[in-house]
Amino acid sequence: MKYLKINPADNVAVVLEALQSGEVLIVDGVNIVVGADIPMGHKIALNNIAANEYIIKYGYPIGHARVDIKMGDWVNETTVKTNLEGLLDYEYKPQDVSLDIPDRKLTFRGYKRANGEVGVRNEIWVIPTVGCVNGTINALAEKLRQETQLKNVDAIVSYPHNYGCSQLGDDHENTRKVLRNMVLHPNAGGVLVVGLGCENNQVKAFKKLLGNYDESRIKFIETQKVDDEYEEGMKLLREIYDVVSKDVREDVAVAELKIGLKCGGSDGFSGITANPLLGVFSDFLIAQGGSTVLTEVPEMFGAETILMNRCVNKNMFDKTVHLINDFKDYFMRNNQAVYENPSPGNKAGGISTLEEKSLGCTQKCGKALVKDVLMYGERIKIKGLNLLSAPGNDLVASTALGASGCHIVLFTTGRGTPFGSFVPTMKISTNTPLYKRKGSWIDFNAGTIVENESIEQVKERFADYVIKVASGELVNNEKKNYREIAIFKTGVTL
């Protein structure tokens, strides 16, 4: 098969392998002459489409034709224009959702924390309150790695960032919230928080923000208040290590897993293979009692009503409307179009409009009801499917997912990327050539869904793999020690 027509209502199909001009396809009994060379993953017109007529994919409009498009033409960003506009009014039309998936009582090997939470890693983190001490935290983490050689501890990692001072209002609070959520994350068996002393993000106030915490596992140093910050820092880290190195994995119900859903550079296969795979996995995990979190609000634009109508009640619908319109307002306040055209990588992969990307992206959360909506910096409170306010930027969104409490981020990509956040960041390729070419980046291949496996077969293999990763198997970003954080910034820096 050289093409895939996703929905019977579609007037375009996705090309599964590159087509040459003059080739003939038979679609629904009609001979279609290919009008131009069309790259793999891109769209071909299945009939004549008049200028301003909707382009239909997944059974929904992904934009309208800029010009007359002939049957067999290559349909891309030069011939398709978005339908998206600014702030909209929405009507709640609730859907009756039943997953009808049995609970298998599955378990993984995790770390049970004293406060009742569970981690999938037992790491020691060195986190700065302010970017001024980034060099210090890097040196401290490296020294502890050399001393201990990671015996009985999964990793020792420093997480530099640029913030913690000279920020105002929401930006300052966002930094504090993300750092707080990292310090309290159950994947960290212990944390050393390193401050300077004169920053806005004062250690004393930050301790209050943490609330109750285990003082044997979370310790603080203000470098301006000690004579030798390295000697004092290593003393505290050794104390933390003595505690953390005694932790052991135990059987834990899969219901405790919290998984983030994220996509990077997309291609024409994203909405056919990897994103739907995450969707069936999300439904599966939720049926086991677990939780998933969908973010990247700008990549909900154009598909937001699908999510709104799956909200568990009117209050959650109203929160989702606020989530969408608040982010649109953020674009408009900064004099930017709300439809945020797809990136060059997305366009090269076959994505023409934000609606097309959104309709593919939102498939990552399956069919479950939306149980809660989280603002940036909030932690998961309710099990099931959650929506989280964060931008589409890969590192900012993945950091936000980890900060919400996700143990692992599942990251689909049609283009490939090596990065990792502060929780295991599993890359799932949309196509097999990417998996074969970038095996040191990609952890799992969803491309077989359009080759020789059903999505249910791939889901079974994928679920097994996720459980293995939750039980300690490293993903590629961990193997290479690619671990970073990025904090969302919207306003003035002094």
Image (tube, helix red, strand yellow):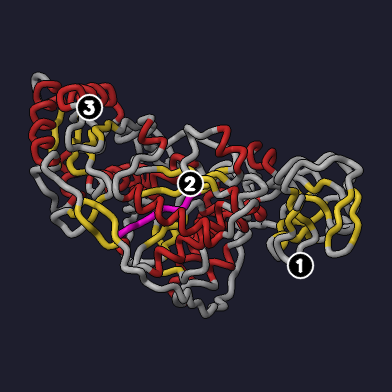
Mark yes or no: residue 480 visible. Answer: yes
State the residue position of label 3.
141
Task: Residue 192 in the image: state x and y as whole percent.
Answer: 17, 35
Specify which label sits upstream in the sequence, 1 or 2: 1
State the residue position of label 2.
411
Q: Residues within 10 Å of mark 3 (few under 14, many from 20)?
A: many
Closest to the observer: 31 or 364?
31
Q: Give how far apart the Cα atoms at labels 1 and 2 are.
A: 29 Å
Is 54 drawn above or below residue 473 in the view shown? below
Closest to the observer: 285 or 74?
285
Specify which label sits upstream in the sequence, 1 or 3: 1
Amino acid type assigned to the residue bearing label 2 in the image: Phe
Q: Residues within 10 Å of mark 2 (few under 14, many from 20)?
A: many
On whether residue 360 falls in the magenta region, the answer is no
State the residue position of label 1.
9
Q: Give how far apart the Cα atoms at labels 1 and 3 are.
A: 56 Å
Exactly how many numbered labels are in the figure?
3
The answer to whether the residue labelled 1 contacts the one labelled 3, judged by CB atoms less than 8 Å apart, is no
